[in-house]
Amino acid sequence: MIEPFRRLARSLAAAALAGVLAAAAPAGAQTLQKVTVISLPSDVSGALYYAKDLGLFAKAGLDVQIQGISTPSLTVQAVAGGTADFGTSSTLLIARAVQGGIPIVLVAPSGATSVKAPLEGIIVGNDSGIASAKDLNGKTFVVSVRGSIVQIEALAWIDKHGGDWKSIKWVEAPPSADGALVATGKVDATVVTEPYFSAALSAGNGKLLTYVGAEISPLVVEGGFYCTPDFAKNNPDAVKKFSDALLAAGKWANAHPADAAAIMQKYGGLAPSPLQHRTVYPERFKASDLQSMIDAGAKYGALTAAFPATDMVAPNLR
């Protein structure tokens, strides 16, 4: 009779030990849900890299794999086609995709430019004599992408300060070359974002005419993270965790700009300029923060018409 009780005692002890070990196991031992994100390292998409580096995704139960892409403008199509679960693009590119019927929905904001820390500005030649919006009438601007946020910000500034925004001529070139094109006189002006903005000024490739963005909103959300409606519907828990981790990472970066810059340098390889303004990260996801750029995009020709910002946000996050 004694042996059966001994076997029972050993079984109970083993079960208790297993429970203790399970309780003591590190959080990383849980099975993480793997999700893929298409992105290129930049301050605007920085929350993705901060959340990854700080372990916020893993803490939320997500194994986030970041994929690069050789043509960033194709990110929307790649996500819509199932190449990745999430992607990140500019507000206007996402808005154009939604207008065009491409199945994507926003789940979190990316970085923003603010009145206190503007990321974009108009640079003119040092000896150009350009000192006002009217002086830009009929002039040639270089921009990295037509229909981009920086172009719309420049047009809004010209329009609201007495210039003729419809008279501006536009050419495209890589942002790293824009300052040099102004310096050599091949174009009259450029509107460019960080880190190219401060780099051009540091190199003496022209002078600052004005910062832009405030004419649209005190806080311009530059873009966001998105997935397909089907993914959002079938994975609501993962989408919420992904969004919350990004917002938490952005809040951390706002409080630790130097540490955030070091993380971006690790992923992107670019050392920040001493003149560079840091991106501001929204700490809440509000569709209304996107409306001003949608409206401006419609007014200045980047969108066919304005529409409610909520139309491009995942239903459970509106």
Image (tube, helix red, strand yellow):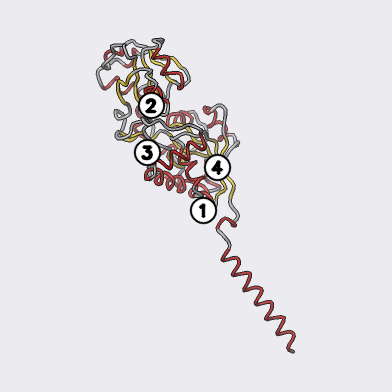
Determine whether the residue tagged by mark 3 lies in a helix, strand or loop.
loop
* Nearest to N terminus: mark 3 or mark 1: 1
State yes or no: discs 3 and 1 in contact (Cβ < 8 Å): no
Q: Nearer the viewer, residue 82 or 68?
A: 68
Q: Amino acid at mark 4?
A: Asp
**Mark 4 or mark 1, which is nearer to you?**
1
Q: Amino acid at mark 2?
A: Ser
**Mark 2 or mark 3, which is nearer to you?**
2
Residue count near mark 3 (Cα–Cα under 10 Å), binned few <14, some 14–19, many ≥20: many
Residue at 39 percent of width and 14 percent of height: 183
Would you say residue 304 is visible in this rendering?
no
* Nearest to N terminus: mark 2 or mark 3: 2
Q: CA distance from mark 4 to mark 3?
A: 30 Å
Residue at 57 percent of width and 66 percent of height: 23
**Residue 198's disc number:** 2
* Nearest to N terminus: mark 2 or mark 4: 2
- Residue beneath disc 4: 230
State yes or no: discs 4 and 1 in contact (Cβ < 8 Å): no
Location of residue 94 in the rendering, given as x and y in whole percent from the top left corner: 46, 32
* Nearest to N terminus: mark 4 or mark 3: 4
Residue 138 picture quarter: top left
**Mark 2 or mark 4, which is nearer to you?**
2
Residue count near mark 2 (Cα–Cα under 10 Å), binned few <14, some 14–19, many ≥20: many
- Residue beneath disc 1: 59
Determine whether the residue tagged by mark 4 lies in a helix, strand or loop.
helix
Q: Is residue 140 left or right of residue 58?
A: left
* Nearest to N terminus: mark 1 or mark 2: 1
- Residue beneath disc 3: 280
